[in-house]
Amino acid sequence: MKKKFLLVYLLLPVLLFITCDKQPSLQSYFVEKLEDPSFLIVNIPFQLENIFSENLTQEELKAVSNIGKLNLLVYRPKENQVQLLKQELKTVEQLLENKRYQNLFEFKAFDKGQGSFLFEGETDQIEEGIVFVSIPGSGFGLLRILGTDINPLVLSKLIKKIDPNLLEKEIADTRSGLSSLL
């Protein structure tokens, strides 16, 4: 009996080491770029209900309440950083090709760029939504939407209801509130 216990005790750390996922993740990419001045990274702390141009349905309000956190990463290279942009884009695209992310839809953005909406989780209960927008030669942006039991179809409807002017106002209000604390 003691030998079996000893064998299990010795094999458990090996098993845990083997099963740990050592692959790079989108979250680790965000953390890695926090100190890089070429990247803008924002944890969006404002009330989501304030950025929509239309009244929300009960289903949409439930989706908004299930969103726990939004993380935004923007990379806009300087003129002499074209090669770095290509490297960063390749890194992000490799991260998004991970089997855990499912592609919900592709879209055109700002008449020059393209994007995609991906998610992790079940088709009716996502844990992480990702909006990726890339403008060739100009940069890219990633928005991580973290929460529980969010319906991706409802989330895609919500994205279409965002009023850019209200979003800009909310960001400005948040900035002025943060700067008054400093």
Image (tube, rainbow, N blue to C red):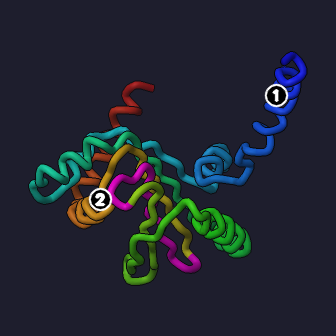
Locate residue 164, reporting x and y percent.
Answer: 26, 61
Relative side of 48 to 87, left or right: left
Magenta span has 127? yes
Given the current orientation, which residue lies at the most extreme right position?
Answer: 3
Q: Nearer the viewer, residue 117 or 5?
A: 5
Residue on which the image places disc 2 = 155
Given the current orientation, which residue lies at the most extreme front position?
Answer: 1
Magenta span has 135? yes
Q: Which amino acid, mark 2?
A: Leu
Question: Relative to 126, is 107 above or below?
Answer: below
Mark 2: few/some/many CA within 10 Å (<14, 14-19, 20+): many
Q: Which label is found at residue 36?
A: none
The residue drawn where x is 41% and y is 57% is: 122
The residue drawn where x is 15% and y is 59% is: 53
Question: Relative to 86, is 33 above or below?
Answer: above
Q: Quadrant of the C terminus?
A: top left
The answer to whether residue 175 of the structure is visible from this angle is no
Q: Which amino acid, mark 1?
A: Val
Locate residue 29, reporting x and y percent.
Answer: 64, 52
Relative side of 122 to 37, left or right: left
Q: Main secondary structure of the magenta part?
A: strand
The residue drawn where x is 63% and y is 44% is: 31
Given the current orientation, which residue lies at the most extreme top position?
Answer: 2
Place residue 19 in its image quadrant. Answer: top right
Q: Secondary structure at mark 1?
A: helix
Q: Which is in the foreground here, disc 1 or disc 2?
A: 1
Residue on which the image places disc 1 = 8
Sooner in the amino-acid sequence: mark 1 or mark 2: 1
Please provide the residue range marked out in magenta.
123-137
